[in-house]
Every structure is written in structure tokens, then in C-alpha cells.
Image: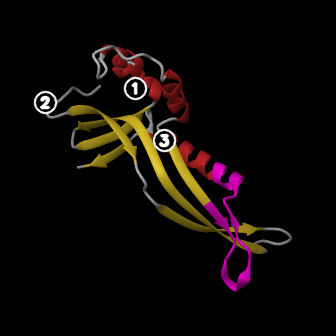
Amino acid sequence: MRERRPEDFQVLCHAKYAGDVRMSLTAEILLDYPMPSFVGLPLKLNVTGITFDGVAVVAYIRKRVHFCFLSAEDADALLGSEQSQGSQNPSDDGRPRSGGDQKEKDLKRQGGLLQEIRVDSEIGRKEDGKQVLKNVGKVERFVLAQVRRIFEEELVYPSFWTFLV
């Protein structure tokens, strides 16, 4: 194990974002029946309204910056649960806060760090009077599941990103 240097440090920060970021992705779905690339269907995904809430860890160690997020369970274990912090802070009228919105907090934890993402989909082209399928539920659910999975696998501890500085 390497010994600590005086210039090495670690920062924990609570990152919370609720906004209307817009991102548009285009791709093509290729059907391989009866032969390879028989039919191509254009796919357009519009991603909007991302809501995020998590604890980030940034560590500077030997001219490298390491970055990751903590899972909700790890963040609660490290920093204490939101409920215990909320019961210690008085509300605006001087009384302690109740745990009445605990159900909402549990729902947020189940969704992970990415609490909400909206995806609108279009399959097909609008040109030449052709019809377009909009808001295809299964496609949208699949894309959301993949985005959440990739985010959790790539950015949540024990995974981390390292930047050389």
C-alpha cells in the first residue's frame, strides 16, 4: 500500500440536478431477415428532463484525479440517512420535521442516482407521406434501462474514472 502524501486529498460532495437538458440521438434499426440488412428503420430518440441526486467522490492521488459516485446505500452508510439528518433539522416553524415523505425518499433510492429521464421515440421517416411510429413504449423502456445500467456500471463505486493531471 502506498503511503499518503501531503498533497493527496479526497472530497465528498452532494450533487443534485433537475433540469431540462435536451439531447437527440439518431440511429438505424437493421432487420436481417430474410437476408442481412434487408430493411433499415430510422430511429430518433429525444432525451429530456434529467433529474439526478447523488454523492460524488473526487480524489487527487499522485497527479491523478479519480471520480465516482456512491450508491445510495453507501452514501447513507457514509453520511447518514436523510431521515436522521431531517429529524435533527427543525422546520420553518421551529418543530422537528416528520418522516412523512419517507415513501418518496424510498422511491428515489429505488430509481438509483438517475431518478428521472424522459425519452420520446420516433421510428420511421416523415418524408413522402410515410407514417411514423411515435413514443414506442418498449423502445423507450429499453433505452432507459440501458442508460441506467451503463451509468451504474461505469460511474458508481467500485467503478471510477481516472484523469491524468
Q: Earlier in the sequence, mark 2 or mark 3?
A: 2
Residue 114 vs residue 83, the one in the foreground: 83
Does the magenta run of residues contain 139? yes
- Mark 2 or 1, closer to the camera: 1
* Residue shown at 45% from the left, 17% from the top: 99
- Mark 3 or 1, closer to the camera: 3
Helix, strand or loop status at disc 1:
helix
Which residues are drawn in magenta?
Answer: 121-142
Q: Position of residue 117 (x, y in %)?
A: 52, 48
Q: Earlier in the sequence, mark 2 or mark 1?
A: 2
The residue singled out by tag 1 in the image is: 75
Helix, strand or loop status at disc 3:
strand
Question: Hey, what amino acid is under mark 3?
Answer: Leu
Tell me whether circle 2 and circle 3 mark residues in contact (CB < 8 Å). Answer: no
Q: CA distance from mark 2 to mark 3?
A: 35 Å
Label annotation for residue 114: 3
* Residue shown at 86% from the left, 70% from the top: 34
Height in image: 44 above or below 79? below
- Mark 2 or 3, closer to the camera: 3
Q: Is residue 60 left or right of residue 113?
A: left
The residue singled out by tag 2 in the image is: 6
Q: CA distance from mark 2 to mark 1?
A: 26 Å
Question: Hey, what amino acid is under mark 2?
Answer: Pro
> Mark 2 packing: few (<14 Cα in 10 Å), some, or many (20+)?
few
